[in-house]
Amino acid sequence: MSQVATSTEVEPIQIEKAQIVSGHGWGAFQLLGAGRKGRASIQQDRLRVIEDWNNGTLFLLCDGHSQGGEDAAQLIIDELPTLLDKHHFSTHRFFATERACHDMDRLIKSRTLGGSTLALVHITQNDLFVANVGDARVSSLEEDSLNQHTRDHRADFIPLREELE
């Protein structure tokens, strides 16, 4: 089962297989999938969709991990939009996203024991902005071709590890 929380819901809803569609036309987004059984006793996935956010639609998808991962994922869903606004996402998307993720990292470490991946998508009439943390991926399907827009951030990925050292 997957849990889905949106900006208007207080309690997550349970669904067997996720097929979530939000928006229409230029703001459309679809998430398809089903969680892997037997991995975690507590569902740690979180999704938030905020329509009419900074002239577009914001999608946040988190996959918590480790003990307390569900708390870390929920904290991101709850706090990241405010942090993005604090760092002026509407005019400085890359800087705001980087700063907000650093702030989020400190907040998670101070409040939870777990961690989380993040896939962020902001769709406007003019463009698509994507960002990810960890192995959360953002892809698009265009004319029967799946295009990945992000790369995984993993310590065992040698080019990334060399870049970090």
Image (cartoon, rainbow, N blue to C red):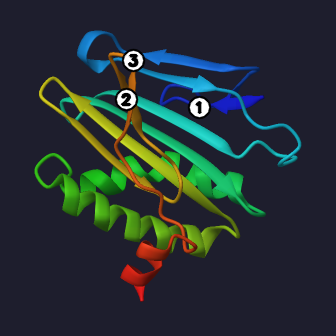
Q: Nearer the viewer, mark 2 or mark 1?
A: 2
Which residue type carries mark 3?
A: Asp
**Residue 5 numbered tag:** 1
Choose mark 2 or mark 3, whichever is in front: 3
Question: Where is residue 161 drawn, in percent x and y?
Answer: 47, 79
The residue that disc 3 covers is 144
Q: CA distance from mark 2 to mark 1?
A: 22 Å
* Disc nearest the viewer among 3 and 1: 3
- Residue in the foreground of this view, choosing between 134 and 24: 134
Of residues 79 and 161, the one nearer the viewer is 161
How many neighbours does mark 2 have within 10 angstroms: few (below 14), some (14-19), or many (20 or more)?
Answer: few
82 w.r.t. 96: above or below: above
With 28 as the anchor, is 42 left or right in this view? right
The residues tagged by marks 3 and 1 sit, at their Cα atoms, a distance apart of 30 Å
Q: Number of labelled discs? A: 3
Q: Can you identify the residue that label 2 sits on?
A: 140
Residue drawn at (34%, 62%) of the image: 100
- Judging from the image, what secondary structure is the residue with disc 2 in? strand
**Is residue 87 shown to the viewer in this render?**
no
Mark positioned earlier in the residue sequence (3 or 1): 1
